[in-house]
Amino acid sequence: SSKLSEDNYLFKYCSTELGKHEFSVWNKGRPIADSPRVVEITSVSNEELLLPRYKGPPIVEGNSVIIRLDVEGIPKQDLSTKCQGPELETIPINFRASASVVDMVLTPQKPGRYTFHDVLYGSDPMSQFSLEVEFIDNRLASPEMEIDERSLEPSSHEQPTKHLPKYRGPPTVQGRTVFITFSTEDIPEDKLTGSCLGPDCHLRKLDISSSNDSVIIGLMPDKEGKYTFVNFTWGELPMASFILDVKFIRKQLSCSMPKVPNEPDSKCTTIQIPDISKTVM
């Protein structure tokens, strides 16, 4: 995602699978208008994305450093980036464009590492990079440039599900508590963490415990509706979000799970959980 202006954000997701995908966005503890929204993917392109290429080492012009990108033969888009200085301060970057190249212009005021992140060509991400700036005899020296190719590697969201706990359903009810069990058999031992949003989009308390070859999530619902389990990880591996439908029938707790967690077509999502002060325990 990237911030376009004070009130506008761009969210981009590149699907590799056909079918319906559900997207949910929260702001200040509540879903925004038209959220969640279902989008059906009917075709997937495997064409290679055309992006600018970093062209040679940085160029020193007076008291500025030029990072040049070759844009010849690719569609013209706006280039944008954010730069962080040696003391984690925000550094302004200027841009110059011609028919075949685009320059990012940095005018450093002190030595140290300058990190360029959120590098976007249009809305497509490019590799992050950093410059190690030095001054020799009060003159700007040619800096070393380090490109972080890892910033474009597939995220850990694409880790195979075979290393994740496997859902062992259906949920069970004991009194006022729902228990959701996952099998941890034949996978590396680790810790399960996550959050649950109630029907009012406030956080709910979860009790997570391990027993033999399983891990159990305990939830005590306080009202009917959908309980959304988000930001679950097994160690550092993200797990798919899932929803629990809760009803009280003749004052007896009843629940169902419309979608089985971590099925092959499940999508791993990370959701910002705001408004912690309004957590309902």
Image: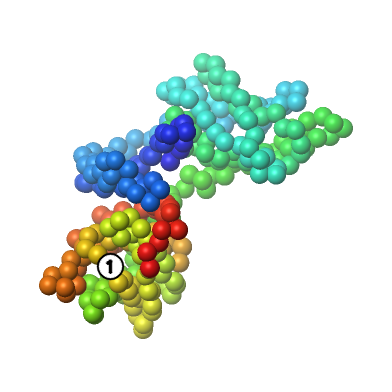
Q: Nearer the viewer, residue 197 or 107?
A: 197
Which quadrant, please, contains the C terminus? bottom left
Task: Write the residue at 66% across / 44% down.
Answer: 88
Q: Is residue 31 above or below residue 160?
A: above
Q: Position of residue 87 (x, y in %)?
A: 70, 44
The N terminus is located in which quarter? top left
For residue 113, side relative to residue 227 (left or right): right
SS for dot 1: loop
* Residue located 38% across and 74% down the image: 208
**Above/below status of 156 relative to 183:** above
Residue 93: name its quadrant: top right
**Residue closest to the far bottom:** 212
> 44 or 202, which lies in front?
202
Residue shown at 48% from the left, 44% from the top: 152
Q: How is the image coloured?
A: rainbow
**Does residue 230 appear anywhere in the picture?**
no
Is residue 235 something that shows in the picture? Answer: yes
Q: Is residue 190 above or below residue 233?
A: below
* Residue situated furthest top in the rendering: 99
The spot of residue 139 in percent (x, y) is 82, 29
The residue sitting at the right extreme is: 137
| Residue count near mark 1 (Cα–Cα under 10 Å), binned few <14, some 14–19, many ≥20 | some
Residue 231 percent across, percent down from the top left: 39, 59
Q: Is residue 245 left or right of residue 268?
A: left
Q: Residue furthest left?
A: 250
What residue would you read off at disc 1?
222
Q: Amino acid at mark 1?
A: Asp
Q: What residue is rendered at 75% in x and 26% in y?
A: 63
What percent of the width, then of the height, locates residue 99? 51, 16
Please tell me how many numbered marks the rendered image carries.
1
- Residue 72 vertical position relative to residue 43 in the rendered view, above or below: above
